[in-house]
Image: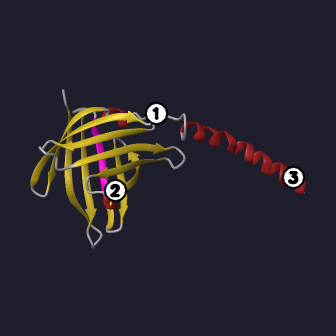
């Protein structure tokens, strides 16, 4: 009986090894974040943000970094001097089956955040868990217009989402 259990356990372990090896090959050193959605964000963009009844514009440069593990978005306000700057790193965890976004801006470390999300069609909704409550940023690609929109939402005390800002990204050049 013990021999049969040991053999069954060994066979089950062998069946899992290819999946682990595949996950290790895609996650970690030597892996690459290859994505048919976010490849469309690579390049230079003009971001127009509607926020609090006003409009702000940012330049966005999206490039692959850290040996193609992340797509880095460098956002800079067009005002002189710049009032807003952010670096956003978008990657993917094959093991977890989800996207990850690390958001750092000139508001400092207290407001830096990590969001996680899953793809639905041409969109990924990132959920950031802040002490003040969840915050959502949904990146949506329009393949016809070749533009991106980002809808940023906070959550009110009653649990309903409230629009914080809406970004439209149009390719420069």
Q: Residues within 10 Å of mark 3 (few under 14, many from 20)?
A: few
Q: Quadrant of residue 53?
A: bottom left
Is residue 107 positioned above or below 40 on the image? Answer: below
C-alpha span from label 2 to label 1: 23 Å
Relative to residue 21, is residue 92 drawn left or right? left
Q: Quadrant of the C terminus?
A: top left
* In magenta stretch: residue 138: yes
Could you say whether the residue bearing mark 3 is in a helix, strand or loop?
helix
Give me the disc on residue 67.
Answer: 1
Relative to residue 135, is residue 12 drawn left or right? right
Q: Identify the magenta region.
A: 136-142
Could you say whether the residue bearing mark 1 is in a helix, strand or loop?
loop
Could you say whether the residue bearing mark 2 is in a helix, strand or loop?
loop
C-alpha span from label 3 to label 1: 46 Å
Give me the disc on residue 22.
Answer: none
Q: Disc 3 marks which residue?
A: 4
């Amino acid at each position: 009986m013990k021999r049969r259990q040991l053999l069954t356990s060994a066979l089950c372990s062998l069946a899992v090894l290819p999946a682990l090896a595949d996950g290790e090959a895609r996650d970690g050193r030597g892996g690459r974040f290859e994505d048919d959605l976010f490849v469309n964000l690579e390049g230079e963009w003009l971001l127009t943000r509607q926020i609090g009844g006003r409009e702000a514009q940012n330049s966005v440069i999206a490039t692959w970094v850290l040996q193609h593990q992340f797509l880095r978005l460098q956002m800079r306000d067009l005002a002189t001097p710049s009032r807003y700057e952010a670096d956003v790193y978008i990657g993917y965890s094959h093991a977890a089956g989800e996207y990850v976004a690390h958001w750092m801006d000139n508001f400092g470390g207290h407001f830096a955040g990590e969001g996680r999300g899953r793809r639905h069609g041409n969109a990924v909704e990132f959920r950031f868990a802040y002490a003040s409550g969840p915050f959502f940023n949904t990146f949506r690609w329009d393949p016809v217009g070749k533009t991106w929109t980002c809808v940023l939402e906070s959550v009110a005390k009653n649990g309903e989402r409230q629009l914080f800002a809406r970004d439209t990204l149009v390719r420069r050049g």
